[in-house]
Amino acid sequence: MDREWGSKPGSGGAASSQNEAIDRKERLRRLALETVDLAKDPYFMRNHLGSYECKLCLTLHKNEGNYLAHTQGKSHQTNLARRAAREAKEAPPAPQPLQPQKRKGNVRKSVKIGRPGYRVTKQFEEESKQRSLLFQIEYPEIEFNAKPRHRFMSSYEQRVQSVDKRYQYLLFAAEPYDTIAFRVPSTEIDKTTPNKFFSNWDPDSKMFTLQIYFKTKAPETKKPQPPLQEIVQEFNSLNDLGPANVLSRHTLPDY
């Protein structure tokens, strides 16, 4: 009995390479019919004869399945890659998006227009014996939706004047004005008592107001005065002082 070598009895002959190619195209055609929408294919065209053409490869096809099988082939895919490369070369370069500049902290660079106008008023409250300062800073050209800022700086932190621990500095800043500073006593600021430390920004008049009160120093306890007899003995030991000087020193109120 005659049979094809390389195949089992009853299974038919072995498929040739041509039959495998035909079977592969058929599978691709069926898969493409289920997944590809020809209405969105820019290279698919139906002519007046009722056949189908590929505008990219300039080929003629009898039905839609044959065209879909062509789109999965090597020639169509090669032409697609060539078309994409040519369009990318001829297309003008796309504008690059602007990248935000990195900022160091909250530092902003803007054109400064000088120092703002200011007014400082010294005050003294009789009831609490506290001294206060009222700062009124004018910012008529301040940036839109911006608010002035203030902070205290120690004498050791600044680098403009020589260090003096008796004073501290009060800074005011608002764009686009220069930062200004006032040297005030280093006495502790009263921030706990109500209405002793407050600030206000008036966007209509463009004026920033800050009032600070300094805490009063606790009265120094006076040392008990030594007996008069000890004072007389102390000063009598000196040759240049007499009893009159001893009496006058004892009666001084600041002793």
Image: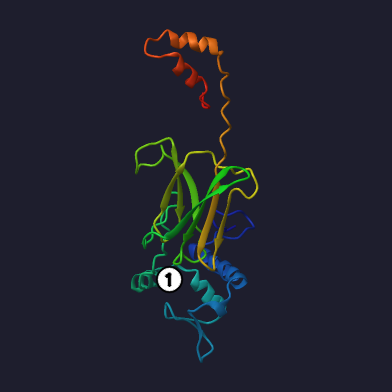
- Name the residue at 46% across, 65% down: 143
| Left or right, 38 with reference to 94 | right
- Name the residue at 46% across, 57% down: 119
Residue 3, quarter of picture? bottom right
Relative image position of residue 148 (x, y in whole percent): 49, 57
Looking at the picture, tell me which residue is in the foreground, 254 or 40. Answer: 254
Give the vertical position of 238 relative to 255 (above or below). above
Q: Is residue 157 visible?
A: yes
Relative image position of residue 218 (x, y in whole percent): 58, 32
Report the amino acid beneath label 1: Leu
- Name the residue at 43% across, 35% down: 165
How would you rate the neighbour count of disc 1 (Cα within 10 Å): few for under 14, some for 14-19, many for 20 or more? some
Q: Secondary structure at mark 1?
A: helix
Residue 173, quarter of picture? bottom left
Give the vertical position of 62 relative to 223 (above or below). below
Looking at the picture, tell me which residue is in the foreground, 169 or 28. Answer: 169
Give the vertical position of 19 relative to 153 (above or below). below
Quadrant where the N terminus is found in the figure:
bottom right
Q: Is residue 174 visible?
A: no
Looking at the picture, tell me which residue is in the foreground, 224 or 103. Answer: 224
Label 1 belongs to which residue? 80
Give the vertical position of 128 relative to 54 (above or below). above
Relative image position of residue 33 (x, y in whole percent): 60, 73
Relative image position of residue 40 (x, y in whole percent): 55, 78
How is colour applied across the structure in the image? rainbow
